[in-house]
Amino acid sequence: MIETLLGALEVDPRVRAAAAAAAPWLLRRDAHRTAVHARVLRAFLDEGIAESDLAGTTGYGYDDAARERYESLLARVFRAERVLARLAIVSGTHAIVAGLDALVAPGATLVAANGAPYDTLRHAIVTAPHSLVSRGVRYVEVPRAPDGGTEAAALRATLRAEQPALLFVQRSRGYAARRSLDIDAIAAIVAAVREAHPATVVFVDNCYGELVEEREPLEAGADVIAGSLIKNVGGGLVPGGAYVAGRADLLERIAARVFAPGIGAGLGPTLGFGRALVQGLFYAPLVVGESLRGLEFAAALFAELGFAVDPCAGAARTDIVQSIRLGAPAQLIAFARGLQRAMPLNARFAPEPGPVPGYVDPVIMSSGSFVNGATLELSCDAPLRPPFEVYLQGGVTAEHAALGAILAADAVLRSDPP
């Protein structure tokens, strides 16, 4: 299998041997995938969409059938009372910040449940011009436990002391040396909130996690979730957008913030992309499953080569991000350049570290996606800071993710020591 995949490509013999040892992970089928796929199939059967629903609108987007049916589909998949999924919400961060801004009034308290959120979101909350803190929101972080999980006792104490309007939970590791949270861990956080301060809204950043586990955070008791449409639920087809889902009363407040009070969710054209939105969701369980198989291979490959990986091959996964600890800036750069060689677009380019808005440290990225920024497609991000981890994401086919991982590993082994 590996020889067929590589063909005439020259690869370090150590990498070839490690890839051969890791190859069985490409053939593994996770039993949970059937349950996830069935959830989406049932949503389509229950929704009963007609082809005429997909045409969509332009302009203001009044009575856009494609939008209405797509949001109804997502509501069925997420078990949400209501969904706001729009091309006009351009990213997961946009969706999250709009939600936080709508639900946390000046003078109220926002608590991050599991340490600092990912860099760009924390910047938007705390340090950026016009941040939530700058307009009077009080912000508190509960430190993570030594094992990277949520510190339950500290969380309960903070909830009782602060009585926050909203508790923010980040499901994915983001681009930091931290644990991704599974649905059971999110359920435990929700239980702590309901015990200590029931009025607190639980808001979960669901990016990278959709359709990975058999349950979604709303089923664990969360009030609101948010994420990007060009990640998991986009299936590799959706050209842009993001969503917020959850309790209807909270979604009404968020819609008023995103658009305008009195107008709320009543407008928003799909601009002819209704078919891509709906078809992308239909394919999403398959593509997420492919991504997970590719990441299992990558984890096994780099573990064979002696690198620390999280999660390990065979461990439970709750998102489409694989952490690989490379240990030095030169190896991060080599990894990104090796991965870039496998990209369907821009493979001839050599990534360089540089400044990224919201990050203190330089960041190197590798991507050649058909949808700009779509991390369901194969990509990596690596802030140049200790412990010098790279975060490998996505892969719409397992074989593509495997090839990218092999070329990245080859570049790392060939790189000069720091």
Image: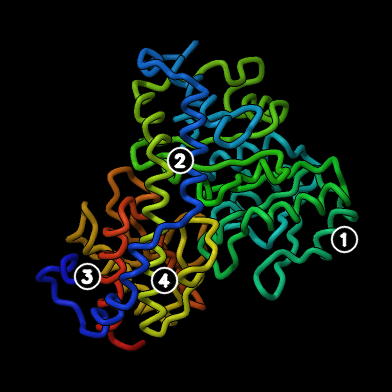
- Find disc 3 in the rendering and name its residue: 2
- Find disc 1 in the rendering and name its residue: 157
Q: First in sequence, mark 3 or 1: give its number.
A: 3
Please indicate whether residue 191 sits to the left or right of residue 98 in the image: right
Element at label 1: helix
- Find disc 4 in the rendering and name its residue: 299
**What whole-number distance in Å separates the C-alpha atoms at marks 1 and 4?**
37 Å
List x then y, in percent, for residue 30: 45, 57
List x then y, in percent, for residue 296: 41, 66
Quadrant into which the N terminus falls? bottom left
Q: First in sequence, mark 4 or 2: give its number.
A: 2
**What whole-number distance in Å separates the C-alpha atoms at marks 3 and 2?**
30 Å
Above or below, 308 against 152 in this view is below
Q: At x 35% / y 16%, what residue is drawn?
A: 51
Above or below, 71 against 177 in this view is above
- Find disc 2 in the rendering and name its residue: 233
Between 160 and 194, the one lying in front of the other is 194
Q: Which circle, 3 or 4, is nearer the viewer? A: 3
**What whole-number distance in Å separates the C-alpha atoms at marks 2 and 1?**
36 Å
Q: At x 48% / y 42%, what residue is drawn?
A: 228
Q: At x 30% / y 80%, what residue is drawn?
A: 18
